[in-house]
Image (tube, helix red, strand yellow):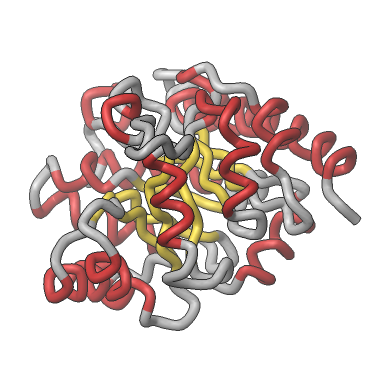
Amino acid sequence: MTREKLFEQILLKKSYLCIGLDTDPQKLPQHLLDTEDPVFEFNRQIIEATADLCVAYKPNIAFYEAQGPRGWVSLAKTLEVIPDEIFTIADAKRGDIGNTSELYARAFFENMNFDSITVAPYMGADSVKPFLVQPGKWVILLALTSNPGSQDFQMLKLADGNEEYLFEQVLRTSSGWATAGQMMYVLGATQAEYVQRVRALVPEHFLLVPGIGAQGGSLEEISRLGMNRQCGLLVNSSRAIIYASSGPDFAKKARKAALAVQREMEVLLEELLVK
């Protein structure tokens, strides 16, 4: 998917919502457990209930890998029911030496036809560039994440009196590897105070922003600080939407939760989007 088509969907749906399909078999509604594929059935109903409210779905690959071959089947079936106009993110956090990254790219882009994949940057350019060779596919590079451990490395100051943080050097260097139509960055919503520093280095890139909802990040704050002339944000919510209910009404409650986010986004887009 191109950047222009993604922006078209944002304008059409008045939404920049990404829904994380972090589907845990231990959290599924009881009535689904007797179905042939409970994980897929859960995802299918979530997608049917929310597809008109979001512009992206982000399966967290670990939730499927942990189930072995059955999980991969559930994931493949899930991708088949996601409408073509919705951006898909393989939240896989891959990144290895070049020939291994080439195989990861083949797995997620060719075999599963994801639009994008999350990649860790710390092995450098040769671990990332194999994901950038296919037209219309995206790398979403980890920049500044929302977990407490982000302080361990990402927030280290560079040596020799340099006032930059390590995550800023990652942004500065990696932005030369691809265009803003090929690469996005992960920026945790709980790191809102650093958005202006991020935007100074990557003003045109999309940011994938996890951390609203269950993790406590502020949609309004991150939107006011991070939105650019093509919106430039995909704000993810996972647990707060897909686990809004554990009963038979789970899809209905998921829609209600997603609708609340979409309506807030509609107001923010009208106010903040640079015309």
Residue positioned 66% across, 49% down in the render: 52
**Residue 83 percent coordinates (x, y):** 53, 62
Q: Position of residue 241 (x, y in %)?
A: 51, 28
Q: Is residue 158 left or right of residue 213?
A: left
Closest to the observer, 235 or 196: 196
Question: What is the quadrant of residue 159 in the picture?
Answer: top left
Please, is residue 24 above or below residue 108 in the view? above
Q: Is residue 261 above or below residue 84?
A: above
In the image, residue 188 above or below residue 88:
above
Q: Is residue 74 visible?
A: no
Q: Quadrant of the C terminus?
A: bottom right
* Left or right: 14, with 165 as reference point: right
Is 19 above or below relative to 70? above
Kindly identify the residue that appears in the image at 64 percent across and 64 percent down. Answer: 6
Instruction: Say whether residue 213 is visible.
Output: yes
- Which one is nearer the viewer's eye here, 122 or 49? 122
- Total labels: the figure holds 0
Residue drawn at the location 34% of the way across and 31% of the way down: 156
Residue drawn at the location 84% of the way across and 41% of the way down: 272
Quarter where residue 113 is shown: bottom left
Seen in the image, is 209 located left or right of residue 267? left
x then y, percent, for residue 106: 24, 75
Give whichever of 208, 111 is nearer the camera.
208
Residue 92 x %, y %: 27, 51
